Amino acid sequence: MRPSAIRTIARSAFARPVLRSNASLRLFSHSTPALNAYTPGPALMLSEDEEMMRDAVEKFATEVVMPRSLAMDEAEAMDKDVITALFENGLMGIETPAEYGGSEASFTSAIVAIEELARADPSVSVCCDVHNTLVNTLVRVHGSQEMKEKYLPKLATETLGAFCLSEPSSGSDAFALKATAKKTADGDYILNGGKMWITNSAEADVFLIFANLDPSKGYKGITCFLAEKSMGVQIAKKEKKLGIRASSTCVINFDDMHVPKENLVGEEGQGYKYAIEILNEGRIGIAAQMIGLARGAFDMAINYGINERKQFGKYIGENQGMQYQYAEAAMQIEAARLLTYNAARLKEANKPFIKEAAMAKLYASRVAQSVASSAVDWMGGVGFTREMPAEKLYRDAKIGSIYEGTSNIQLDTIFRYLKKEYAKQ
């Protein structure tokens, strides 16, 4: 991102100094995709724009998100000012073209942002992740020109979105969904049903809803619709969760909800294809979230061990047994980052990436759980208390093996592609 591309924003709603990063600039306004000028280099090398993104989001996460993380976890609610700050700083339209008010950055830039936010609070990270990699991408790629002009500017600057696929009877078997849509005589649609485990739903005003327009066709009847909350989306229940408690996860219902024909996303009967495409991409975002979480736990625990906690006259990090554990965890985090950023680059280059995304998501979720658990151990009693973030990150890590495809689903995906590679024809 070149200096000329950074512009100062009006912060009428963001004027409270407590939420302002030291740099009173919009963090991202326009960025050139990294691969346009790609030359071979280290596997984790970022473009100049992406490095600027990392530095800016790291600063934002440290100054804005981290001081509120524990309070949001206790309240089990996202601070509305944090959501406002994400929009004000250009983090909710990272890949959205500049003509629609977005940052027009690379997919890897979004992954960088998700990772850095997770280091401070995985709840804020997943809010940003779902909004960018699922909601914005689906509208940007499959929405009509009219839909893009109407909704992308809002989604980039002020309106939170939710992706609504899962139901009580359709989790891993996502296409067993029961929600229905019927077409009216004038071409509009009437939606009935409900969804559950919907991230961002308590704060969202835009909902991408998958419903079956023709159940006789099975999953080939599944169609995607964009509904505004005011059209009749009801928040039925907010789940009380083990981790990522500040991220809202709700049951939603819609009864005889009228959705105008122009809010059809893409084509009728293609919803299952869109969902598969977008979830494969989204898994890279979850991998980045898990890496950021692991980094946050590791940074805290190693600093405690080598700079703060002394036993028997020396820092506990001076013990060889501790040093080996730190080294092992650092290696695992780096390996997870390599898998994740490789998948991101493959996706950017329009190369096959589904197997690599599954590997990244599976491995990063395992690393996050392992490192977060070790961090509690390394910090001892203080790590077990709720005064420190270690126990929170330990709870937050568990979701990585569950959402956007369980670990077993990732293993199944990986083997399906291995079979294609190795099975004799």
Image (tube, rainbow, N blue to C red):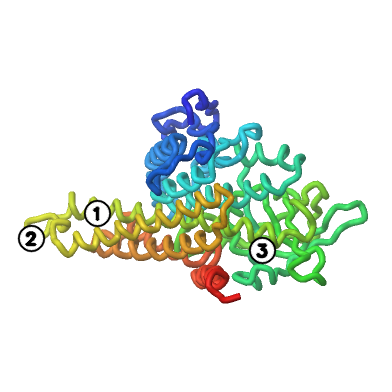
Task: Give the residue drawn at x 18%, y 52%.
Answer: 306
- What mark, if any, has residue 302 been given in the picture? 1
Per the image, the residue denoted by label 2 is: 312
Between disc 3 and disc 1, the foreground one is: 1
- What mark, if any, has residue 195 been given in the picture? 3
Task: Give the residue drawn at x 22%, y 53%.
Answer: 304
Residue 348 is left or right of residue 231, and the answer is left
Depth order, front residue of 381/185:
185
Q: Amino acid at mark 1?
A: Ile
Q: Position of residue 419 (x, y in %)?
A: 55, 73
Q: Specify which label sits upstream in the sequence, 2 or 3.
A: 3
Q: CA distance from mark 1 to mark 2?
A: 18 Å
Crowd tier of the residue under label 3, counting other residues whose Cα lies within 10 Å: few below 14, some 14–19, many 20 or above:
many
Q: Position of residue 211 (x, y in %)?
A: 74, 62
Residue 265 is left or right of residue 239, and the answer is right
Q: CA distance from mark 3 to mark 1?
A: 41 Å
Instruction: Label 1: state its secondary structure.
Output: helix
Q: Specify which label sits upstream in the sequence, 3 or 1.
A: 3
Task: Give the residue drawn at x 41%, y 29%.
Answer: 23
Q: Amino acid at mark 2?
A: Phe
Q: Amino acid at mark 3?
A: Lys
